[in-house]
Image (cartoon, rainbow, N blue to C red):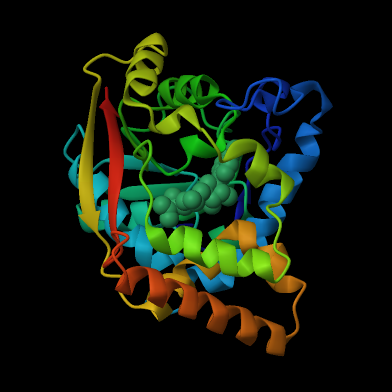
């Protein structure tokens, strides 16, 4: 059964209404009551589906960037992996699950909203499911890995409560508050000059996510019933260094997928070249650019 087909989880695959409460945005910036939550979720899913090929392809797309982060997360797991049943939550293409299998896990279930991402999972059992309504019985997993998943949930507490219900332990990651790299802004600026606008789900959920706030994470994990809660920050080198690498990483991200789809091949080439020029200028300059090292917050609890 492992990895042979994609299972449909059956949970309400939408952000709950409360998830429309986009942490970090106050009501002056966004009237949460006006958000169509199901539409945002559908947008997120469609964009991850559309990004899956670029995400997983080559040595420099987002997959290449997230793989070392996943290995670092698994290395921090609060329980030994050998012989364990692991849930890779918000698995995407399954890099965290792969790292868990390499560390001795006996089986990995990979759960994600995006069937497109799950199609690239190797070695785990893919299940289409919503992190806040998982189709698994209580206490099913020895360990839940949530690699850059909680930051996609409007309410981190809903995700952590569900993780607590199905799992005995958790290792979760998010970008450290304030972490960035000059290539992100440079590439984004180039894309905007060609008409890129962030899709609704990204504008609503991505900015100001509390999932990387160590204090919020620790408090929320404790409130969900976890003990032995620990939050620490690690720096992880990704190996991405050249303008071409860095632009491939950015272009493969799901929130750029609708923009890329709107361009013809010549337009995509022009966008890539412009972004590579912008990134080259910033990493050659004195703005702190250079090889991509990610500052990552890791929550572990059991
Ligand atoms: C930044 S990607 C990380 C993927 C993978 N964990 C990794 O580290 O490469 C976030 C993933 O979370 C998934 N996701 C977002 N919201 C979700 C939800 N409510 N339930 C399940 N998966 C979700 C997305 O579809 C996407 O695959």
Image side of residue 236 versus residue 10, left or right: left
* Displayed quadrant of residue 178: top left
Above or below — where is 149 with respect to 243?
above
Above or below — where is 53 with respect to 117?
below
How many tags in the picture? Answer: 0
Above or below — where is 192 with respect to 167?
below
Above or below — where is 197 with respect to 169?
below
Q: Quadrant of the C terminus?
A: top left
Q: Is residue 121 visible?
A: no
Image side of residue 218 versus residue 36, left or right: left
Residue located 46% across and 27% down the image: 210
Q: Horizontal and vertical percent for residue 213?
A: 38, 27
* Displayed quadrant of residue 173: top left
Q: Is residue 183 visible?
A: yes
Image side of residue 97 versus residue 233, left or right: right
Q: Horizontal and vertical percent for residue 108?
A: 38, 49
Q: Horizontal and vertical percent for residue 263?
A: 75, 78
Which residue is nearer to you in this view: 183 or 65?
183
Query: Which residue of the protein is positioned furthest toward the bottom in this rendering?
Result: 266
Residue located 19% across and 40% down the image: 76
Residue located 67% across and 68% down the image: 193
Q: Horizontal and vertical percent for residue 205?
A: 61, 37
Which residue is nearer to you in this view: 49 or 242?
242
């Amino acid at each position: 059964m492992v990895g042979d087909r994609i299972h449909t989880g059956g949970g309400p695959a939408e952000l709950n209404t409360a998830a429309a409460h986009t942490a970090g945005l106050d009501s002056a910036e966004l009237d949460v009551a006006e958000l169509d939550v199901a539409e945002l979720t559908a947008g997120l899913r469609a964009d991850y589906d559309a990004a899956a090929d670029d995400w997983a392809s080559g040595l420099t797309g987002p997959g290449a960037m997230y793989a070392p982060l996943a290995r670092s997360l698994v290395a921090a797991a609060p329980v030994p992996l050998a012989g364990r049943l692991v849930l890779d939550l918000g698995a995407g293409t399954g890099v965290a699950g792969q790292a868990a299998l390499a560390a001795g896990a006996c089986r990995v279930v990979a759960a994600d909203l995006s069937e497109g991402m799950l199609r690239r999972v190797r070695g785990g059992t893919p299940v289409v499911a919503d992190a806040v309504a998982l189709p698994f019985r209580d206490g099913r997993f020895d360990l839940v890995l949530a690699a850059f998943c909680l930051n996609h949930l409007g309410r981190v507490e809903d995700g952590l409560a569900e993780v607590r219900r199905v799992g005995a332990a958790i290792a979760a990651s998010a970008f450290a508050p304030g972490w960035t790299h000059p290539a992100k802004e440079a590439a984004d600026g180039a894309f905007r000059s060609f008409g890129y606008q962030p899709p609704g789900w990204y504008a609503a959920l991505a900015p100001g996510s509390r999932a990387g706030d160590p204090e919020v994470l620790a408090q929320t994990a404790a409130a969900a019933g976890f003990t032995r809660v620990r939050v620490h920050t690690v720096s992880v080198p990704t190996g991405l260094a050249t303008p071409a690498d860095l632009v491939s990483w950015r272009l493969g991200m799901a929130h750029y997928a609708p923009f890329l789809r709107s361009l013809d091949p010549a337009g995509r080439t022009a966008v890539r070249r412009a972004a590579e020029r912008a990134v080259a200028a910033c990493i050659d300059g004195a703005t702190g650019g250079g090889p991509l090292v990610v500052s990552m917050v890791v929550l572990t609890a059991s």
